[in-house]
Amino acid sequence: MTTEHTPPQAAAYHPVPVPSVSGSILFAGCPDLIGTPFTYAREEEVYGEGEEAEFVYKVVSGAVRTHKVLSDGRRQITGFHLPGDLFGFEQGEAHRHTAEALADTRVLIFKRRQVERAAADRAEVACQLWGMATNNLRLAQDLTLLLGRRSATERVAAFLMDVDERLGGSGTFALPMTRRDIADYLGLTIETVSRTLSQLEEDGALQRAGGRQVSLRRAKLRRVVED
Amino acid sequence: MTTEHTPPQAAAYHPVPVPSVSGSILFAGCPDLIGTPFTYAREEEVYGEGEEAEFVYKVVSGAVRTHKVLSDGRRQITGFHLPGDLFGFEQGEAHRHTAEALADTRVLIFKRRQVERAAADRAEVACQLWGMATNNLRLAQDLTLLLGRRSATERVAAFLMDVDERLGGSGTFALPMTRRDIADYLGLTIETVSRTLSQLEEDGALQRAGGRQVSLRRAKLRRVVED
DNA sequence: CGTACCATTGAGCAGATTCAACGCAAGTGG
DNA sequence: CCACTTGCGTTGAATCTGCTCAATGGTACG
């Protein structure tokens, strides 16, 4: 383990309104489950594949990616976790992914055993966790369709619309991840992602400024994915 | 809805030992949740995308596939459900996939509301459902890695080993699905699947007999996927 | 024995990758 | 403050994997 989880250094609390995070309480009906604030620096590992799954995490600010790697270096990112998202749950004792912070990130840490105990005691909590898992399953299956049956252009367009929505839906935002991350999420190469973005811009489906900043023409992009 | 779920016509019960199905009870600790036996013919639809998710299902014998389709006909199969597997759960009121029987299939049907009520009442049941969903999530993420980062040969080899394992692990079995189903699961075309099987046979990684029947050389196949 | 469906095989093509060069912006150290 | 380095992103050319289109073979079923 590269990072120590204790003590959580009482991360300076900023009373900044963070989207879709209601506080440090995991479940509305369960005030005894309080998370411990913690921070990770950009590119820092939260946990590694194979490590014991001792904690679960809720993103407060920043962003986290979870991925798997093959022995020859090929990488597949299975999810980006933005503020409000919960991640780190596993079936079994070990983490099956590696999790890393995309940017400086604040999270709340919960003891997995404690959450499991709460679930075992209170059906309400278990149902919430069940719902969360089912929801993540839906997202994973949507990604499956994307990777299995969509072209590079469709993947990038769908990705942009997804990120926009999760970031508030204004249509203008800075991508929180690099081209490499995008490529490894969409099952493409960075060159293809770059070329596709250029093509979409040429087609008037978006405008770029300084690499990360994009401004979407949602109607045009929607026509690209069109399912 | 193309099929009526009532009455279940008391499907002729064959006392054949079916792998990993312990009986008609969904949860060990919950004998009040009894499933109703039902059968579907080969290629028959169990439920369609967009339909109200009224029931959940447990496979007794046969096999079921769940898939999504794009408007232009491209199809992605997100899962094959073999004896012992549970399917049909959704977050929200509507099914997000279509489910069809691969072969003549016997299932147990449970009222979704009833299962949900049991989960809300008994934390033990909810935890089991949570665990099941988490497990399905793991499978979906494994498929994600397969679709995003593996070659056609690796996909087919991994698929064969997976089916073998789920069918008992003898190394010799009949594939319960067509080439089209395999292709739509692996994000390939039927031609590529066929060519890949021919290639694997030529390399001595398997033997074929009559289209569906295969006999795996597990060691060689394992070397192909090698992660 | 014919029909229909499934699977295999071949030839040519296309979309995405690989390999490589280059531009740009942000550090870093002299 | 500037030279140098480093990382990220873009673009071009050549290559290749897997797809499309097409023909043929095999098997089950009426």
Image: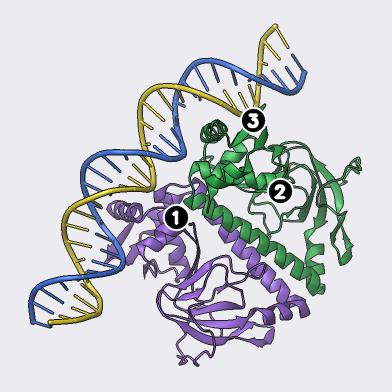
Chain colours: A purple, B green, C yellow, D blue
Q: Are marks 1 and 2 in contact (CB under 8 Å)?
A: no
Q: Give the residue pinned by disc 2.
A: B166
Residue beneath the point at 37% across and 69% down = A173
> Closer to the observer: label 2 or label 3?
3
Amino acid type for the residue under numbered disc 1: Asp
Whether callout 1 and callout 2 share a subunit is answered no
Amino acid type for the residue under numbered disc 3: Arg
Residue B124 vs residue B172: left or right? Answer: right
Q: Distance between the residues labelled 1 and 2?
A: 27 Å
Residue beneath the point at 79% across and 74% down = B123
Q: How far apart are marks 2 and 3 (CA)?
A: 19 Å
Mark 1 nearby-residue class (10 Å; few <14, some 14–19, many ≥20): few
Residue B121 vs residue B65: left or right? Answer: right
Q: Give the residue pinned by disc 3.
A: B208
In the image, is residue B193 above or below residue A207?
Answer: above
Q: Give the residue pinned by disc 1.
A: A72
- In percent of width and height, residue B77 lies at 60, 46
In which quarter of the view is residue B130 placed? bottom right
Q: Are marks 1 and 3 in contact (CB under 8 Å)?
A: no
In the image, is residue A138 above or below residue B200?
Answer: below
> Closer to the observer: label 1 or label 2?
1
Secondary structure beneath label 2? helix
Secondary structure beneath label 3? strand
In the image, is residue B167 above or below residue A36?
Answer: above
Of mark 2 and mark 3, the one earlier in the sequence is: 2
- In percent of width and height, residue A109 lies at 57, 82
Q: How far apart are marks 1 and 3 (CA)?
A: 30 Å
